[in-house]
Amino acid sequence: MKKPTKLKRVVAYIDGFNLYFGLKSKGWKDCYWLNIQLLVQKLLKSDQTLVITKYFTARVSRQPEKQKKQGIFIDALNTLKDFKIFYGHYLITPYKCRKCGNTYV
């Protein structure tokens, strides 16, 4: 009799901003509402099991419409089992005009 194979435990780490901007750069707008955890599960090998998905992001600021959309997406992610969201800080990079020297955000 064959001994059952012990499954390897997998923790998925997702960088939310890199995922979003990667999808955006490819023009894959229809994937913005991607079920991240289901994607990870589909990528597992037969001898692996997903323990938890850790999603790293920062709240969008100064853009009410984007804040609203992000909030709805995060609410949806919070319904997933074994899914944890970690928040960092969104840093706004100031830009300096080469012609006039004015700095703006």
Image (cartoon, rainbow, N blue to C red):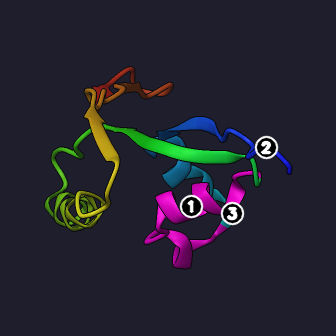
What residue is rendered at 86% in x and 51% in y? 1
Residue 100 occupies which quadrant of the picture? top left
Residue 18 lies in the magenta-colored region: no
Q: Please report the residue visible at 70 percent of the width from the left and 56 percent of the height from the top.
A: 43
**Residue contact at pointers 1 and 3, CB within 8 angstroms:** yes
Indicate the secondary structure of the residue bearing disc 3: helix
Q: Are marks 1 and 2 in contact (CB under 8 Å)?
A: no
Residue positioned 59% across, 54% down in the render: 40
Closer to us: 61 or 45: 45
| Disc nearest the viewer among 3 and 2 | 2
* SS state under label 1: helix
Marked residue nearer the N-terminal end (1 or 2): 2
Q: Amino acid at mark 1?
A: Lys
Q: Tell me where residue 19 appears, x and y as whole percent.
A: 54, 49
* Disc 3/disc 2 C-alpha distance (Å): 45 Å
Residue for badge 3: 26
Which mark is first along the chain, 2 or 3?
2
Q: Is residue 98 left or right of residue 91?
A: right
Q: CA distance from mark 1 to mark 2?
A: 46 Å
Name which quarter of the figure residue 97 lies in.
top left
Along the viewing direction, whichever of 96 and 26 lies nearer the viewer: 26
The magenta segment is 27-45
Q: Residues within 10 Å of mark 1 (few under 14, many from 20)?
A: some
Depth order, front residue of 80/92 = 80
Mark 2 = which residue? 3
Q: Position of residue 86 (x, y in %)?
A: 28, 33
